[in-house]
Amino acid sequence: MSFKEIVNTIKISKEFMLNFVKQGQVVLDCTVGNGNDTLILAKCVGHTGKVYGFDIQKEAIERTKEKLDCENLGKHVILILDGHENIDIYIKEELDFVIYNLGYLPRGDKSIITKKETTLISLEKALGLLKENGVLLITCYIGHEGGLEEKNAVETFLTSLDQGKYNVLKHEFINQQNKPPILFIIEKSKTGGIK
């Protein structure tokens, strides 16, 4: 990773996905949005893997499906028009990787945002489905109304996780203006976490 690749959270998340997610894995995009992360995940897991993708907006699901179909990657991606707090209704298998981008749909209705109440329910369920040594990424956008409150709720929840079971990292730019997003990286530890 070069210097210019750490200038924003999106590039860091992308690099993480490209280096962590492997062929044949089962992964989850809890907020598909415009489909960028879902597309990366579909390429990474290949035709032997599986991607689940959730969004509450039909527009987001349609944009994502179109992106996947353009690259002939839709066959191993299951797109679900529902809130991410309901992932356990649809997913019964363990997950290798989970990603969230909290906020609103870019180029969409900015009044429709992720909410701390449903996000916390979803996070608890996602951690339960995550395999040992699996990783969960959360990007919290805080520049919109409700974003900071959601980030604070997520951070409080993550701070409370047992360090014997989880390793939690917070990545935050401290010299940038305009409220840059904050990235949390959670690993479900096989070795018992950091002592």
Image (spheres, rainbow, N blue to C red):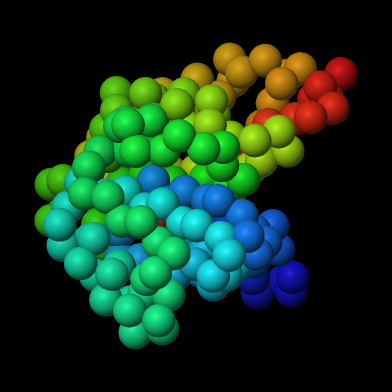
Residue 186 located left or right of residue 143: right
Q: Position of residue 82 (x, y in %)?
A: 22, 42
> Where, by quadrant of the figure, is residue 18 drawn?
bottom right
Q: Position of residue 72 (x, y in %)?
A: 40, 81
Residue at figure coordinates x 37%, y 23% from the top left: 121
Picture layout, residue 85 above or below residue 44? above
Q: Nearer the viewer, residue 85 or 152?
A: 85
> Where, by quadrant of the figure, is residue 77 drawn?
bottom left
Picture layout, residue 155 above or below residue 42? above
Residue at figure coordinates x 17%, y 52% from the top left: 57
Single out the residue that lies furthest toward the bottom: 70
Quarter of the image with the C terminus is top right
Picture layout, residue 150 above or below residue 162? below
Q: Nearer the viewer, residue 113 or 143?
A: 113
Q: Position of residue 6 (x, y in %)?
A: 64, 64
> Where, by quadrant of the figure, is residue 38 drawn?
bottom left
Residue at figure coordinates x 41%, y 38% from the top left: 91
Residue at figure coordinates x 71%, y 33% from the top left: 132
Whether residue 150 is visible: no
Picture layout, residue 138 above or below residue 48? above
Quarter of the image with the N terminus is bottom right
Whether residue 145 is visible: yes
